[in-house]
Image (cartoon, rainbow, N blue to C red):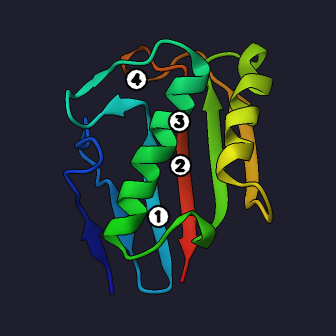
Amino acid sequence: MKKILKTKQAPEAIGPYSQGVDTGDLVFVSGQIPIDPATGKIEATDIENQTRQVFENIKAVLLAADLGLEHVVKMGVFLKTLDEFQAMNAVYAEYFPGDPPARSTIATAGLPMGARVEIDVIARR
């Protein structure tokens, strides 16, 4: 089983990929950048608010599969610079105050649309 997830509560894909894919047991959420789904633009300029927007986008895609952040088992975090790791991590902790998922964090040379952060997710039913 493979169901493509699509919701207007998260930004539309900006390339040839799906917002998410539900395989029944596992749900894969494509990398989300801090696009405001209402405007289609990155409105936040600081890492804290960009990270919050990314998590709101992730929550919306998970909701399309009837899941929430508590179902997340693995996250990949991509930062424009590791200098912003602590600030991103503080916001991350707001969304996962206990029992956080496994995670990797890397710095990258660039992200789409000039984003400072991108996060992808694997969730399990």
| Residue kind at label 3, given as amino acid type | Arg
**N-terminal label among 3 and 2:** 3
Q: Which residue is mark 3?
A: 52
Of residues 76 and 11, the one drawn nearer to the viewer in this rendering: 11
Q: Which residue is mark 1?
A: 28
Sequence-earlier tag: 1 or 4? 1
Vertical order, 96 against 115 (above or below) = below
Q: Are marks 1 and 4 in contact (CB under 8 Å)?
A: no
Question: Looking at the image, which is closer to me, 72 or 22?
Answer: 72
Circle 4: element type: helix
Q: CA distance from mark 2 to mark 1?
A: 8 Å
The image shows residue 39 at horizontal and vertical percentages of: 20, 27
Q: Position of residue 62 (x, y in %)?
A: 42, 64
| Label pair 3/4, CB-CB below 8 angstroms | no
Type of amino acid under label 1: Phe
Circle nearer the N terminus (1, 3):
1
Query: Tag 1, which secondary structure?
Result: strand
Q: Which mark is in front, 1 or 3? A: 3
Q: Quadrant of residue 43?
A: top left
Looking at numbered disc 4 in the image, what kind of residue is underneath it? Answer: Pro
Q: Secondary structure at mark 3?
A: helix
Q: Is residue 35 above or below residue 47?
A: below
Q: Secondary structure at mark 2?
A: strand
Looking at the image, residue 56 lies above or below residue 48:
below
Residue 117 in view (yes/no): no
Q: Is residue 38 above or below residue 73?
A: above
- Residue 7 image position (x, y, % from top left): 23, 57
Residues at badges 2 and 1 in contact (C-beta under 8 Å)?
yes
Foreground mark, 3 or 4? 3
Residue to which mark 2 is pinned: 120
